[in-house]
Image (cartoon, helix red, strand yellow):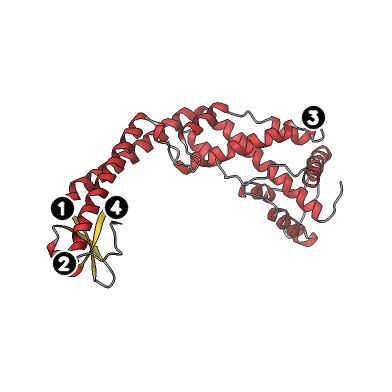
Amino acid sequence: MFFYPDNFESKIGFDKIRNLIKSECIAAPAKSLVDDIAFSTDIGCIRHSLALTGEMMSICMLKDNYPANNYPDVSQAASRMRVEGTSLQLFELVDIRTVLENSRALRAFFRTDEKNEFPNLKKIVDSINFPNYLYDRIQSVLTKNGDIKDTASPELREIRSSLISTQESVSRKLNTILTSFREQGWVSKDLSATMVNGRLVLPIETTYKRKVQGFVHDESASGKTSYIEPQEVLEKNNRIRELELSEAREIQKILYDLTCEFRPYADNLKNISQVLAELDFIRAKAKFAISIEAII
């Protein structure tokens, strides 16, 4: 048995190698794997690790279609999914979709390896049990930009329809009032309705603010402009706020229901995350090896 001093890595310069490999990693999970690198005397393990790195070196040098994409760490989201009563956040749902898309791209890449040039890497990717239902379900709920679709639930569609209708009604009313105020010289011609504290208001010259019935929400820094919510739209603005709160509650309900629906896939998702991190880690070692013209 051999015992190494605590500073042995720095003595042989491996701490610098570790940092160089880490700089080639795409995402944080792979960097954690670099931190976990340890000495080994297991010849089988060493040969397998070298074989993986060698295959990835060939890919990096010969294949320009390898999907080396950035990916989020969804391990915490996968762990929380297991717990009854928890709910995924919207950004976590978006992250899960990204991870699934990345894993699907990797599976597609290695399916083209008909000559079995990369058997060890292919074996890792083949361990991915792609959850088609999970991906399709997320696609049915999320837009391309990562927002919840109107069609995610009948209730959400109805709320958003009412919200748009009420906002348009307020906007039309404010434009009518604004035209009248401009004619009387109470509003500058270059100013229009604006949003203050989540309410649609009119920028009225402070000199004339007492002529307008309504609620003063704010003033400009100079004090020359007052932002007033006219009495005529007060009730409708209240309705907009109610609908916005209803929308937020419905989105949270949708996310909770999806979390319950996705719970059986938590382990599957965690495995996919580990595969992405492992391939990123192997690619980082391959990129470093290429940079120093290393050979097995």
Question: Residue 75: x percent and y percent?
Answer: 56, 40
Query: Which residue does the numbered mark 2 point to in the structure image?
Result: 208
| Residue that extends furthest to the right in the rendered view of this protein | 295
Question: Residue 295: x percent and y percent?
Answer: 87, 49
Instruction: Judge left or right: residue 200 versus residue 154.
Output: left
Q: Earlier in the sequence, mark 2 or mark 3?
A: 3
Instruction: Judge left or right: residue 154 versus residue 229.
Output: right
Q: Is residue 257 above or below residue 191?
A: above
Q: Disc 4 on helix, strand or loop?
A: loop
Q: Earlier in the sequence, mark 3 or mark 4?
A: 3
Callout 2 amino acid? Tyr
Q: Which mark is residue 231?
A: 1
- Residues tagged 4 and 1 counted as in contact (Cβ below 8 A): no
> Which is in the foreground here, disc 2 or disc 1?
2
Q: Disc 3 on helix, strand or loop?
A: loop
Query: Which residue does the numbered mark 3 point to in the structure image?
Result: 114
Q: Disc 2 on helix, strand or loop?
A: helix
Q: Is residue 235 visible?
A: yes
Query: Which residue does the numbered mark 4 point to in the structure image?
Result: 198
Compute the Cα span from label 3 to label 1. 72 Å
Callout 3 amino acid? Glu
Q: Earlier in the sequence, mark 3 or mark 1?
A: 3
How dense is the environment of label 1, judged by Cα within 10 Å: few (below 14), some, or many (20 and up)?
few
| Residue that extends furthest to the bottom in the rendered view of this protein | 222
How dense is the environment of label 3, judged by Cα within 10 Å: few (below 14), some, or many (20 and up)?
few
